[in-house]
Image (cartoon, rainbow, N blue to C red):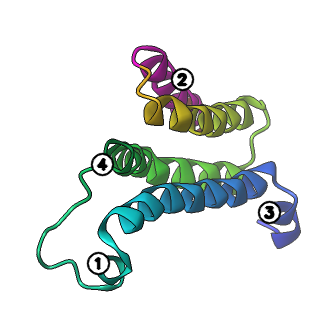
Amino acid sequence: MDAAVLAVSPFITLLAWSVVLLAVHIGLQSIPATLELGSAWNAGPRDDGQKPSGVFAGRAERVFANFRETYPAFVGLAVALAVTGDLSGWGLAGAWLWLVCRIVYIPLYLAGIAYVRSLVWVGSLIGLLVMTAVLIF
């Protein structure tokens, strides 16, 4: 595939935005942990197994772990769709659905909002399944 075609692929832009979202997760997880346990803990090897005990820090860690469960699949699917092309537009719709749901999921999880948060998570999974279906069918 021509590099110029990849350069204009909307999937490349979505991949870039997904990295921004990754950085947001890293900040949301690391800042409250560092505030609670100190910069020496953050800069150190963390061999003692100490973890932050605050509610917000715990939720931030769990929402980040949840993101990391589906992020590799999104990256792989987005690259595959960028390379093969998405003539139907459904793959792009699925990618946007995943990204928007992952963004909405963060404040819902941090606020402890049940059920709606789970529905949003299902929406992100549907986005991945749509992307997969475009590649398979």
Residue 56 in percent (x, y) is at 39, 44
Q: Quadrant of residue 40?
A: bottom left
Return the residue found at the far top: 115
**Mark 4–mark 3 distance (CA, rounded to whole Å):** 44 Å
Residue positioned 54% across, 47% down in the render? 74
Q: Which residue is mark 3?
A: 6
Residue 1 in percent (x, y) is at 76, 65
Please state the extent of the stretch shown in magenta in the rendering. 114-131
Q: Which residue is mark 4?
A: 54
Give the amino acid type for the residue marked by disc 1 in the picture: Trp
Give the amino acid type for the residue marked by disc 2 in the picture: Gly
Residue positioned 46% across, 23% down in the render? 117
**Mark 2–mark 3 distance (CA, rounded to whole Å):** 27 Å
| Callouts 4 and 3 close, C-beta under 8 Å | no
**Mark 4–mark 2 distance (CA, rounded to whole Å):** 29 Å
- Secondary structure beneath label 4: loop
Magenta span dominant secondary structure: helix
Q: What is the number of callouts on the image?
A: 4
Q: Is residue 112 above or below residue 47?
A: above
Q: Is residue 132 visible?
A: no
Which numbered disc, 2 or 1, marks the residue closer to the eye? 1
Residue positioned 13% across, 69% down in the render? 49
Front residue of 63 and 12: 63
